[in-house]
Amino acid sequence: MRRYVFVLVFMALLIGSLFRASADTGARIMNMFATIGIFLFGVVGTLALTRWQSNNGVKDVHAALKALEPEWVITDWAAQGGGKPDYLLVGPGGIVCVCVDETPQSTWATFARKRIARGRERVQAAERWVQGRLTESLPVSSVLLLTRRRAQEEYTADGVTVLNPPTLGELVAPMGAKLILDQRERFDLTRKLRSV
């Protein structure tokens, strides 16, 4: 993030110098370069903001997951793909498949609904992947975490709960109260799913 700040400060100084040089020398071409610089400043600023929001979203997800330990055994598959959930949670009352969606708050509502619908499809596919590898019947839930957009009631559909990371603990708390899997069984099941 610091890198972006340095680039933005340098660009601002350069743009200001170009406008000043244009005013002092009367060379209008400097105005053109300064205007191009303003456009590039906007592009770099947007990239910096997106990166900052993404990093904060990842931190929020990790904080929400960390709060579930030690009752829940957590597997991080966020970088793997292949039909697996981004995070697999195995708890006392069952399994939760979690996928993360980074749809920004600034996205138009129609496009946001479509992107979130694709996210729900992805987490449903991940749930099917998990259920296909289970030998016993266990409750499996699906959650889509929105890291850059406020979750709304209308986003939850098709058996997939859509929420923001800080509310994940509230959702899984009832599952943590049931005891279907003891700690050894949770570790064994997690090992089995990780080895597939």
Image: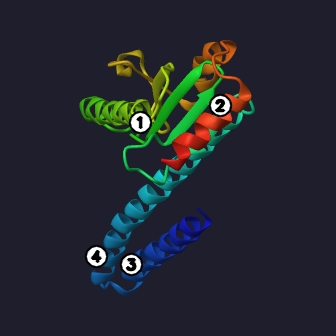
User: Looking at the picture, does residue 30 appear above or below residue 131?
Assistant: below
Instruction: For marks 4 and 2, give the one nearer the viewer.
Output: 2
Which color scheme is applied? rainbow
Image coords of residue 150 (percent x, y): 47, 28
- Residue behind mark 2: 186
Tell me which label, 3 or 2, sits earlier in the chain: 3
Tell me which label, 4 or 2, sits earlier in the chain: 4
Determine which quarter of the picture holds residue 15.
bottom left
User: Looking at the picture, does residue 117 appear above or below residue 86?
Assistant: above
Instruction: For marks 3 and 2, give the one nearer the viewer.
Output: 2
Instruction: For marks 4 and 1, give the one nearer the viewer.
Output: 1
Which amino acid, mark 4?
Met
Which amino acid, mark 3?
Ala
Quarter placement of the N terminus: bottom right
In percent of the image, x 41 and y 16: which residue is there? 153
Instruction: For marks 3 and 4, give the one nearer the viewer.
Output: 4
**Other residues around mark 4 within 10 Å, as few (<14) / some (14–19) / many (≥20):** some
Do labels 4 and 2 touch, CB within 8 Å?
Answer: no
Image coords of residue 61 (percent x, y): 59, 39
Between marks 4 and 1, how big is the CA–CA gap? 33 Å
Image coords of residue 139 (percent x, y): 50, 19
Between marks 3 and 2, how big is the CA–CA gap? 71 Å
- Residue behind mark 3: 23
